[in-house]
Amino acid sequence: MKIRAILLAGATALAVTTPAMASDAVGWYLGLGAGWDTMELAHYNNPSSTPPVAIKLPYHDDVLGTAALGYKWGDSGFRTELELGYEQRGVVHQNFPAFGVSDTGGMQLGSAMFNAVYDIPLIWGITGSIGGGVGVGNLHNRIVLQDPLGTTGLNGLSFVKGVDTGFMWQGIAGISMPIADNMDLYADYRYRTTSNGARLASDIPGISPVHLKAPVENVGLFGVRWYFNPPEPAAPPPMMAPPPPPPPPPPPMPAAVKTFIVFFDFDKSNLTDKAQEVVSEAVKSAKTQGMVRVVVTGHTDTVGSDTYNQALSERRAQSVKDEMVREGLDGGSISIEGKSFHDPLVPTGPGVREPQNRRAVIDLGG
């Protein structure tokens, strides 16, 4: 009951004081532990001796200390370790009135065990463990009889004495929680027994060898495991590439060119009433749409020489520009040119008075 109470208290302390995280440490580790060790009654006997020996002796509870070098095999859950242990305990002092003696002394037990353990993730960062170990135990045992009155002749004689090495095994169950990236705190229950003490000597004539039945220990063990290589930090999430810059806005569409045609009388460059209406409409459109560039091109029919018609076409373009300026447009934004009869609206032969070719074309652009 004492061992169970100690383990329950230790488990509660682990759950309360340790942050809830899962240990990711793997690889080599060093374990150190200490705990309360209770041994069941020790059975000493030699049925063939004279007189026959059959006695059960209690031993005091004591402390078991352990040191382990182990390896945690990645994410498989398995751990293996080489564990060294040491304990010593005194025999409970007893009187044997029938023999007129009492006892004193004790035993020391050193162990070397190979353990295999499987770790099982539970909840709140707690890991359960189950496993076992096999190895050897080295037992030093001596129980001395005391007869202060000297009436028995047994005072100072060893009831049992000797050193014996034998097979040893243990069962393991426990829990653990990390207290740092590379350190675990654990609480284990150990059931240990050994075959040591099969042949112990005695100073009392006729009863050697004395056999010690495999002693059974119940241990509540607490300790830490320190991993040599802390877990690598989690890789940062991949950086998202910045979104590409938005494409530049498309260049503004050039304003559509709007065209007006002004017609002239034969061999004239002055504006008719109809021609003035067309010019006025062109000026109004230019102001409404914010046109900043105006081109006026003069044309003629094919009557007359090229030189004469070139001059006439330029005068016609100038007449339109003058009227547009008079109606409020900036003369600096208006350009003029003449093309004589080289760009007829209606193709004709030489010397033809074609009214459609006697014109000035107003182009309103942005």
Image (tube, rainbow, N blue to C red):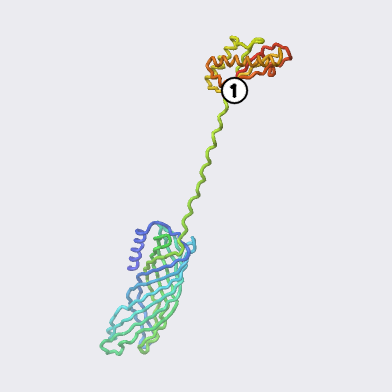
State whether residue 243 is above or below residue 223.
Answer: above
Amino acid marked by disc 1: Val
Q: Nearer the viewer, residue 310 or 117?
A: 310
Q: In this view, does 290 lie to the left or right of 357?
A: left
Counting labels gives 1
* Quadrant of image for the N terminus: bottom left
What is the x, y in percent for residue 259? 60, 19
Q: Nearer the viewer, residue 29 or 283?
A: 283
* Quadrant of image for the C terminus: top right
Q: Name the residue under label 1.
A: 257
What is the x, y in percent for residue 246? 53, 38
Q: Circle 1 — which element? A: loop
Q: In which quarter of the image is residue 141?
A: bottom left
What is the x, y in percent for residue 320? 59, 15
Q: Is residue 299 left or right of residue 222?
A: right
Q: Residue furthest right?
A: 349
Q: In which quarter of the image is residue 266?
A: top right
Q: Which of 308 and 152 is in front in this view?
A: 308
What is the x, y in percent for residue 215? 39, 76
Residue under the image location 60 percent in, 12 percent down: 275
Local crowd size for mark 1, using a 10 Å CA cut-off: few (<14), some (14–19), many (≥20): few
State whether residue 308 is above or below residue 102.
Answer: above
Q: Is residue 262 left or right of residue 138?
A: right
Q: Which of 29 and 270 is in front in this view?
A: 270
